[in-house]
Image: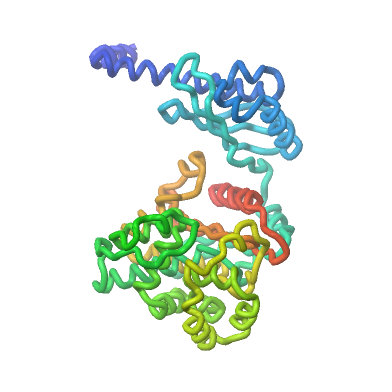
Amino acid sequence: MRQAFLAIALLLALPSTARADVDQDYVMADTADLRASQIEYVLKGDMAAEEVFSPSFLAEIPAAQLQSLAASLVAQNGRIVGVDRVEYKGNGAAVFDLMFEHGQGDASLQLAAEEPHLVSGFRISSVVPTDDTPQKILADFAALPGTAGFGVWRLTDEGLSPVLASKADVSLAIGSTFKLYVLSALVQQIKAGKRHWSDVVTLDARSVPSGQMQDWPKDAPVTLHTLATMMISISDNTATDTLMRLLGRDAIAREVIASGHSDPSRTLPMLTTIELFALKAGDPARIAAYAAADDAGQRNLLDQWAPDLARERVDLGKLIGSAPNAIDSVEWFASAEDVARILRRLRDTGDPAVLEILAVNPSVSQQEGAHWAYAGYKGGSEPGVLNLSWLLKDKEGHWFVISASWNDPAKDVDPGKLQLLAVRLFRMLRR
């Protein structure tokens, strides 16, 4: 009784506007709990979508599309059995678990600000089998077409301690995950006092998307910290090439070797993003010549072809929507274990800016992120190539790496399949 009296007294002591905010939070939290349950009924066909979802939502995703989504999820995971663990996050947002007969779905909703606070946003980010095992994960990785390799490691004072792995030592194309080596080379020069995060350089190495900086003003002044953040968080290619030109190819090559890369020659000389795009969009004879040359020969060819390996010479039409192209020769390569080593090396720099940059875009759901004290991420993709890699710290202070790559020279890979397998690795690791 005394606790209840104190709670009421504290509430009465609040300014009227503050009390209104508190009352509104209670209303929205209760409504979020109700709407989550109603979403279950809509998906099961027991309630009309118009009673739960806002007109603006249904204009984008009609009721028939919701039923189609539900049918697909039920076909894969068994019947919908309920809603669990609704958590109100504020500002009308909530996350919850949508439970299936054989799976658990990470779901989120957004309530409209105006009464009656209908659902204006709804998403299911993934559904993970509730009866999952390491053996099932291994089997599903093995069933992917092409070649897939992954590993989960705990980081110890002695190095990498494997938790679960398959083909983790196989060198595969990793796409933009190579940018971790560029970041590491930059950090080493900062540690040596040669450069500083606040150093300002001009944006003078324009590439093509992904990214935004290719459209920034010519010779715009930017700090090294900005370049590194853009390179990692949104995989900005112009930021990457600007840093690579500044650091030099040799410095990045030294970092590849120092990190313990299992086969440096496979990925050296390290191509800039514009060199890779220009080669893939150019004369196939050049690709063949590059693939046949040794490291020194490849470097000579890059110098010889430099005038043609420029943004102005790249035909983007040949890259957009294309099939896998030379992913076994004109690419950046590393095994899952190599990626774990470079992430460990980045963590061990002791520079807080490194972890902050890696964590700008952690690429985990709200539900999953709540289980970790830290999550940093870098991934990479192109047709036929996908890599997903995380540096993680649990709430007990233990560090882990999850890295997974999938290559298929015959056709593009399905990002959803690898992402779901990664979610299952997260759940397994937490268990």
Q: Is residue 60 visible?
A: yes
**The residue positioned farthest toward the right in the image shown:** 75
| x, y percent for residue 351 | 31, 62
Question: At 70% across and 24% down in the image, what residue appears?
Answer: 44
The answer to which of 399 and 20 lies nearer the viewer is: 20
Q: How many marks?
A: 0
The answer to which of 13 and 283 lies nearer the viewer is: 283
| x, y percent for residue 135 | 69, 55
| x, y percent for residue 57 | 57, 26
The N terminus sits in image quarter = top left
Tell whether 192 sits left or right of 161: left
Tell whether 195 sits left or right of 23: left
Question: At 55% across and 64% down in the image, what residue appears?
Answer: 175
Q: Is residue 333 visible?
A: no
The answer to which of 141 and 358 lies nearer the viewer is: 358
| x, y percent for residue 245 | 38, 73
Tell whether 7 sits left or right of 345: left
196, above or below 118, in the image: below
Question: At 45% across and 17% down in the image, what residue appears?
Answer: 114
Q: Image quarter for residue 205?
A: bottom left
130, above or below 172, in the image: above
Question: At 40% across and 57% down in the image, what residue appears?
Answer: 213
Scheme of image coloration: rainbow
